[in-house]
Amino acid sequence: MNEIVGRIFTEVKKVVSGKDDCIEKAFASMLAGGHILIEDVPGVGKTTLALAFSAAMALENHRMQFTPDVLPADILGFVMYDKEQGGFFYREGAIMCNLFLADEINRTSPKTQSALLEVMEEGCVTVDGVSHPVPEPFLVMATENPKGSAGTQLLPESQLDRFMIRMSMGYPDFASELLIAKGERSRRRADSIRPVIDAAGLVGLQREAGAVHVDESIYEYITKLVAATRENDYIDLGVSPRGTVACVRMAKAWAFVKGRDYVLPEDAAAVFLDVTAHRIVLNTKARVAKLTAEQVLGEVLASVTRPSSFGARAARGRMGA
């Protein structure tokens, strides 16, 4: 593992224990320049994870609790008249930061959701016809309660597609929850985290992750996986081409997190479910069989033959020769 990446993980784990896979997947998504959707029940550490990453990388972060009365202007900002200067000037909204935590995004109105998701896609805020670029890097970590929670507005498929991965924290294991019960976790607050890099450092890591080598056989493997979702008997809507690109970017970031400068088939397989589970729509047949998106995609993953890992290594070796 890259030394800097390892130090970032060490800092984050000071306040998030027993969730190594979640930490690694979230950071890989950040390296890939993607936004993260965390779907889980309240109180399992979703907000803590976001704040820990922002502290470990000295990112400017803003947090907004989404409620039905939150307006697009609260997020995007607005133009107002300044009497002293004699003109109209833009006042920044909460979105103008490096890491924006949108807490319970499914509790606000579809209009406000759309305003946020448009910035995620375009990388700029447009108010009164004038565009204002967001800072670099710009990442959104949104949380939502599980389906069926009272008072929620579920994100449509076209907007879910804007998130690179969807993940779940889950309940802590016994040892971690025992520490929580004893109050150990409360003594390890986010202010104990020491910054390892700053925003410019993260941009540098993103460039390094983007330069990770992908063999032609890996591109073909990912494309076959995506194509299989469009032909599956349990899926009405398969993964979009945006999902294909996201799979490649995440596989490269995952390889980088694991300390390699080339992608193995195992890297693509490791991130496939996280990247694609929220991008598909199951049909009635799947619902009758009580299958989840993860179960169906697991079958897709098992049905597509992986290319030889040795082939990927050999290809990388030829490039470096």
Image: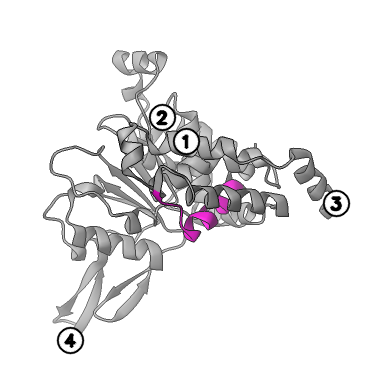
Crowding around mark 4 (Cα neighbors within 10 Å: few <14, some 14 to 19, many 20+) is few
**Mark 1 sits on what residue?**
23
Estimate the x, y position of residue 176 in percent, counting from the top left: 39, 18
SS category of the residue bearing label 2: loop
What is the distance, in whole Å, between disc 4 and disc 3 at their CAs?
Answer: 65 Å
Of circles 1 and 2, the one toward us is 1
Residue situated in front as seen by the camera: 111 or 240 = 240
Crowding around mark 2 (Cα neighbors within 10 Å: few <14, some 14 to 19, many 20+) is many
Task: Confirm or deny contact between disc 1 and disc 2 (CB under 8 A).
Answer: yes
Amino acid type at image mark 4:
Gly
**Mark 4 sits on what residue?**
86
Camera sees residue 93: no
Estimate the x, y position of residue 320 in percent, counting from the top left: 83, 52
Crowding around mark 1 (Cα neighbors within 10 Å: few <14, some 14 to 19, many 20+) is many
Tag 2 or tag 1, which sits nearer the N-term? 2
Give the residues drawn in magenta, as a range: 236-251
Q: Please state if 26 lies on the left or on the right of 186 as rendered.
A: right
Please tell me the numbered disc located at residue 16. Answer: 2
What is the distance, in whole Å, between disc 3 and disc 2 at their CAs?
Answer: 41 Å
Tag 4 or tag 1, which sits nearer the N-term? 1
Crowding around mark 3 (Cα neighbors within 10 Å: few <14, some 14 to 19, many 20+) is few
Amino acid type at image mark 1:
Ile
Of circles 1 and 3, the one toward us is 3
Of circles 1 and 4, the one toward us is 1
Give the residue at x 27% y 59%: 94
Tag 3 or tag 4, which sits nearer the N-term? 4
User: Residue placed farthest to the bottom in the image?
Assistant: 86
Amino acid type at image mark 3:
Arg
Please tell me the numbered disc located at residue 239. Answer: none
Of circles 4 and 3, the one toward us is 3
**Mark 3 sits on what residue?**
318
